[in-house]
Amino acid sequence: MRCQVTHGRALCLALALLGGGAAATAEPAAAPTLESLMAGMAQTTGVEARFRERKEIALLSEPIESRGTLVFLPPDRLVRVTTEPSRSRLVIAGQSFSFHDAAGGEAVDLSANPLAREFVDNFIVLFNGDLARLRERYEPVLSGDAASWSLALRPRHRPLSDLIERITLEGSGSTLRGMEMLERDGDRTTTRFEDVAVDRRFTPEEIERWFAPSEAEAGE
């Protein structure tokens, strides 16, 4: 992914998280509707899944592949940990947004950064089951049936629409299985989910482990 310098690193980090995704539960009928899919997402108590990601970038001859784990705790806490080929940790917790890897890290106060807040809100709405906000921010087109459905989302507003052509979610039955993001410049990110656990009820110890600052973060 190539981010415009004028948008700043916070925007790049937000788009990096969009390259991942949360798997969510739903209870679609034989012919699922957007309402039934989003209603299922709104009812989830938590999600944990492993992901495999493939980034195809025009300037590179070979795609970039990565693996890791994604955790979503409604309404606004999300962690994306990459373990291969290198470790990184991206965390959203309310008004806090941070990214850390071997080179260091950066924290953003979303309440004081409207641009970063806009990007974070645009993908949190995908996982939170807020149908009204989804329609406000995207042009949704749902196709398929309960065995195999696809939801194409085109951003309606800038700045996301300047960078993203389309986000496509794919699922089977009650679980989101894949996500593809096509950028305006032709770059493409494809994410597949494995070992998806929906309706996770995280213990206080698990929440602390996933969302509390690491020693490296706390020391900055």
Image: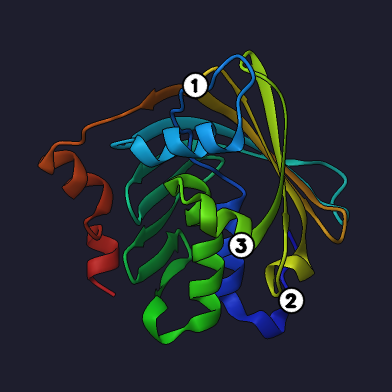
Which of the marked residues, 2 or 3, is nearer the chain's N terminus?
Answer: 2
Question: Where residue 177 sits: x, y (%)?
Answer: 58, 26
Label 2 vs label 3, nearer the camera:
3
- Viewer-closest of 65 and 180: 180
Q: Which residue is mark 1?
A: 174
Q: Which residue is mark 2?
A: 4
Look at the picture and state if 209 lies above or below 32.
below
Which of the marked residues, 3 or 1, is nearer the chain's N terminus?
Answer: 3
Mark 1 lies on a secondary structure that is loop
Q: CA distance from mark 3 to mark 1?
A: 24 Å
Q: Which residue is mark 3?
A: 136
Q: Quadrant of the C terminus?
A: bottom left
Mark 3 lies on a secondary structure that is helix
The structure residue drawn at horizontal position 53% and vertical position 22%, both measured from the top left corner, is 28
The structure residue drawn at horizontal position 59% and vertical position 53%, both measured from the top left corner, is 18
Residue 19: which disc?
none
Question: Where residue 39 sits: x, y (%)?
Answer: 44, 37
